[in-house]
C-alpha cells in the first residue's frame, strides 16, 4: 500500500496572530509545500495534490472568477462531486471575497434550480458538462456556467486573499428540506472563525498523543456543513485529507485510504454492524456462538454484573472474533466521528467492543454544523456530548433544544420571517426534542415537528420507536412510524424482511411500553426510501411527509381494513 507523506503539523509551526480561518488555511497550505494535502481515492489508487499544486489551482480559478466579473460579495455556486479541484474552487471563491454556495451534485436538477434561483449567483462553477446541462435544462434563465476545465485553465492570479471582515458572509448552505422547500443558511466569517479552532482543538485532544499525521478519509459530500467543517479543519491544521470519488466502491476505497478516522452518518455504522452480524450468523459454529456470548458478556461488564466466566468469555471473544472484525473494518482505524442523526446506543457499544471508539457530534447547518461533541473519556452511548465552549443550551417548550452562541447562523437568505421564527430573543430554536443529563450531556429524542399525537392524545417521538425496532431486527434497514390522529401506531417497512421476523421484533418493542406506545401492526411497502425517489434528504434523513404522501392509499387501506376487522369482532 502506498505510504502517505507526512506534512508538518501546525502545532509545531505557530501562525501569526489575528489571521482568519481562510488566511490560516492558505498559510498552512504554503507550509505543506510539496507534500500531499488532498488525496483522491480511485479504487486502489491514490492521486495526491500537494500544497503547492493546490495553491496553483486556486490561483487559476481566481483568474477565471475575475475575468468573469465576479466581485466581493457576489454569490458563486459550486456544483461538483468531491475532488481536489472542488477544494481549490472553494478556496478560490473565498479568496476573491465572493460567497460560496455549494450544491449537491446528485440532487434532482429541479431542486437545484430552486436553490440557484433563490441565491441568484453571478456564476456557477460545474465540474462537467453533464451537470451543467442538467442544471440548464431545469433552469432556462440560468446565469453563466463555467466548467472546471475552463476555470482551471485561466491565467493565474497571484495576489493576497481578499481581506475578510468578521461580518462578511462566506457561504450560503441550503438545508436538506425534510419538511419543505430548502432555505439558504447564511454563515459569516465570524461563525467559521469560531468553529474551526474548536474542531481543530477537539481533534488534537483525541489524536495529540500519537504525535504523527492523521490519515483522514472523507466520503460525505463536501457541500454539507459538517463535511465542510471537516475539510476546513484538516486544511487549517495542514493535515492531508483523503477524498472518496466513488460511493459505490466505498469498501475498496476505505482499504486504500487505511485511515485513522473518518466522519460518517449513523446509517453507515448500522449497515456495517448489520452486515458483520449477518456474515457471522451465516458462518455459524464457534464464531457465531462466541460473537453472541461476547456481546452478552460485554453488556454484563458494563452493567457491573460480570462474573469470572463472563470476563473469560469476553477476553476470548475479543481475541478470536472481534479483533478480526476490527482488521476487516480498518486495521489502522482508531475512532469514528458520527453526526447528522442520533446513533443507537447498542451500535456505539458494538464498535467499542470491536475496538473503535465512536465520538458523536450534534449540530445543524444553522449552528455552523456543531453544537455538542463527545469528549475523550466522556463518551456516553446514546448521547451526543457536551456543548462547545461559549455555546449555551437550554430546553424550551415541548422539550425543544434552544442554542445561543458564536456558531449560530446569521439568518436565512432572503427569508426575514423564517429567520425571526428561528431566532427568538437571541436563542436559535433547533426543532429537535432533547434531554440534558445532570452533567450537560445531550440526548436527542427526535424532531418536534415529527411528534405523533394518536387518538389517545399522547405525544410520541417516532425516532426512538423506529430505532428499537431496528435494534431487535437488524435485517430491517429502514422503517417509519405513522399514526398521527389515527387510532393506533402503524410501522411502514420496505424491503424483503420476512413478516414473521418483523412481527417478532414488534413484540419485543411492545413488551415493556404502555399501550399508547405499542405498534399495533406493520405495513410492507414495495419501494425503499432513497434520495433518488425523494423519500430521503441528501444526508439520508427521512422526508416523512413525502413518505406518507407516497403511500397514502396503502396507509388508509391498512387503517380501514383493521377498523373493519375490529368492528366485526365487536
Image (tube, helix red, strand yellow):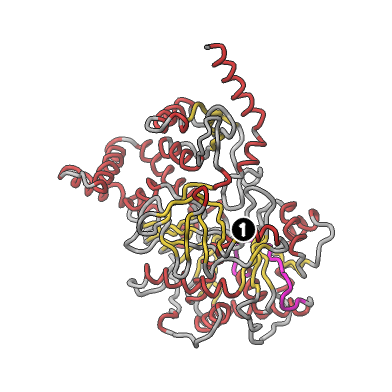
451 up-or-down from 200: above or below: above
Q: Which residue is mark 1?
A: 422
Quadrant position of residue 306: top left
Q: Is residue 291 left or right of residue 195?
A: left
Quadrant position of residue 70: bottom right
Q: How many marks?
A: 1
Q: Which residues are magenta?
A: 70-85
- Give the quarter of the figure containing the N terminus: bottom left
Q: Is residue 52 visible?
A: no
Q: Which residue is found at the position 30% from the left and 52% from the top?
A: 323
Closer to us: 168 or 235: 168
Q: Is residue 407 left or right of residue 472?
A: right
Q: Secondary structure under badge 1?
A: helix
Q: Is residue 145 left or right of residue 187?
A: right
10 Å crowding of disc 1: few (<14), some (14-19), many (20+) = some
Q: Is residue 354 visible?
A: yes
Q: Residue furthest right?
A: 141
Closer to us: 126 or 256: 126
Q: Which residue is found at the position 50% from the left and 42% from the top?
A: 461
Q: Position of residue 548 (x, y in %)?
A: 63, 36
309 up-or-down from 142: above or below: above
169 up-or-down from 542: above or below: below
Q: Position of residue 74 (x, y in %)?
A: 74, 73
Amino acid at each position: 500500500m502506498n505510504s502517505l507523506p507526512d506534512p508538518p503539523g501546525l502545532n509545531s509551526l505557530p501562525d501569526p496572530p489575528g489571521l482568519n480561518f481562510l488566511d490560516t488555511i492558505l498559510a498552512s497550505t504554503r507550509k505543506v509545500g510539496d507534500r500531499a494535502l488532498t488525496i483522491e481515492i480511485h479504487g486502489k489508487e491514490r492521486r495526491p495534490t500537494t500544497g503547492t499544486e493546490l495553491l496553483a489551482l486556486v490561483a487559476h480559478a481566481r483568474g477565471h472568477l475575475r475575468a468573469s466579473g465576479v466581485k466581493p460579495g457576489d454569490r458563486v455556486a459550486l456544483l461538483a462531486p468531491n475532488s481536489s479541484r472542488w477544494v481549490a474552487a472553494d478556496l478560490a471563491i473565498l479568496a476573491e471575497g465572493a460567497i460560496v454556495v455549494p450544491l449537491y451534485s446528485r440532487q434532482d436538477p429541479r431542486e437545484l434550480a430552486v436553490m440557484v434561483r433563490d441565491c441568484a449567483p453571478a456564476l456557477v462553477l460545474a465540474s462537467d458538462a453533464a451537470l451543467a446541462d442538467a442544471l440548464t435544462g431545469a433552469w432556462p434563465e440560468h446565469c453563466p456556467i463555467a466548467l472546471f476545465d475552463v476555470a482551471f485553465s485561466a491565467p493565474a492570479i497571484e495576489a493576497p486573499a481578499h481581506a475578510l471582515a468578521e461580518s462578511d458572509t462566506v457561504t450560503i448552505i441550503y438545508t436538506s428540506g425534510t419538511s419543505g422547500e430548502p432555505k439558504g443558511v447564511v454563515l459569516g466569517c465570524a461563525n467559521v472563525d469560531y468553529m474551526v479552532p474548536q474542531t481543530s482543538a477537539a481533534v488534537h485532544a483525541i489524536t495529540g498523543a500519537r504525535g504523527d499525521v492523521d490519515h483522514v478519509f472523507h466520503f460525505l459530500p463536501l457541500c454539507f456543513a459538517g463535511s465542510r467543517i471537516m475539510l476546513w479543519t484538516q486544511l487549517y491544521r495542514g493535515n492531508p485529507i483523503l477524498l472518496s470519488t466513488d460511493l459505490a466502491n466505498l469498501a475498496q476505497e476505505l482499504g486504500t485510504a487505511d485511515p485513522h478516522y473518518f466522519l460518517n452518518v449513523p446509517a453507515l455504522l448500522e449497515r456495517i454492524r448489520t452486515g458483520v452480524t449477518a456474515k457471522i450468523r451465516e458462518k455459524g459454529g464457534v464464531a457465531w456462538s462466541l460473537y453472541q456470548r461476547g456481546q452478552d458478556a460485554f453488556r454484563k461488564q458494563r452493567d457491573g454484573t460480570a462474573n469470572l466466566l463472563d470476563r473469560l468469555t469476553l477476553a476470548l471473544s475479543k481475541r478470536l472474533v472481534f479483533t478480526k472484525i476490527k482488521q476487516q473494518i480498518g486495521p489502522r482505524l482508531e475512532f469514528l466521528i458520527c453526526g447528522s442523526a442520533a446513533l443507537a446506543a447498542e451500535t456505539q457499544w458494538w464498535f467499542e467492543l470491536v475496538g473503535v471508539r465512536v465520538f458523536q457530534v450534534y449540530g445543524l447547518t444553522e449552528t455552523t454544523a456543531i453544537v455538542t461533541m463527545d469528549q475523550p473519556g466522556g463518551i456516553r452511548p446514546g448521547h451526543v456530548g457536551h456543548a462547545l465552549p461559549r455555546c449555551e443550551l437550554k430546553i424550551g417548550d415541548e422539550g425543544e433544544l434552544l442554542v445561543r452562541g458564536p456558531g449560530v447562523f446569521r439568518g436565512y437568505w432572503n427569508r426575514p420571517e423564517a429567520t425571526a421564527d428561528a431566532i427568538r430573543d437571541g436563542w436559535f430554536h433547533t426543532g429537535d426534542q432533547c434531554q440534558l443529563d445532570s452533567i450537560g450531556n445531550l440526548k436527542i429524542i427526535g424532531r418536534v415537528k415529527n411528534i405523533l399525537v394518536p387518538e389517545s392524545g399522547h405525544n410520541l417521538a417516532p425516532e426512538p420507536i423506529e430505532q428499537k425496532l431496528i435494534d431487535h431486527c437488524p435485517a430491517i434497514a429502514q422503517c417509519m412510524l405513522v399514526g398521527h390522529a389515527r387510532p393506533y401506531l402503524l410501522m411502514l417497512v420496505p424491503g424483503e424482511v420476512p413478516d414473521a421476523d418483523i412481527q417478532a421484533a414488534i413484540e419485543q418493542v411492545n413488551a415493556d411500553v404502555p399501550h399508547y406506545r405499542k405498534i399495533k401492526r406493520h405495513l410492507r411497502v414495495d419501494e425503499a426510501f432513497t434520495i433518488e425517489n425523494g423519500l430521503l434528504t441528501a444526508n439520508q434523513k427521512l422526508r416523512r411527509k413525502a413518505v406518507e404522501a407516497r403511500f397514502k392509499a396503502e396507509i388508509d387501506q391498512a387503517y380501514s381494513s383493521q377498523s373493519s376487522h375490529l368492528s366485526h369482532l365487536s
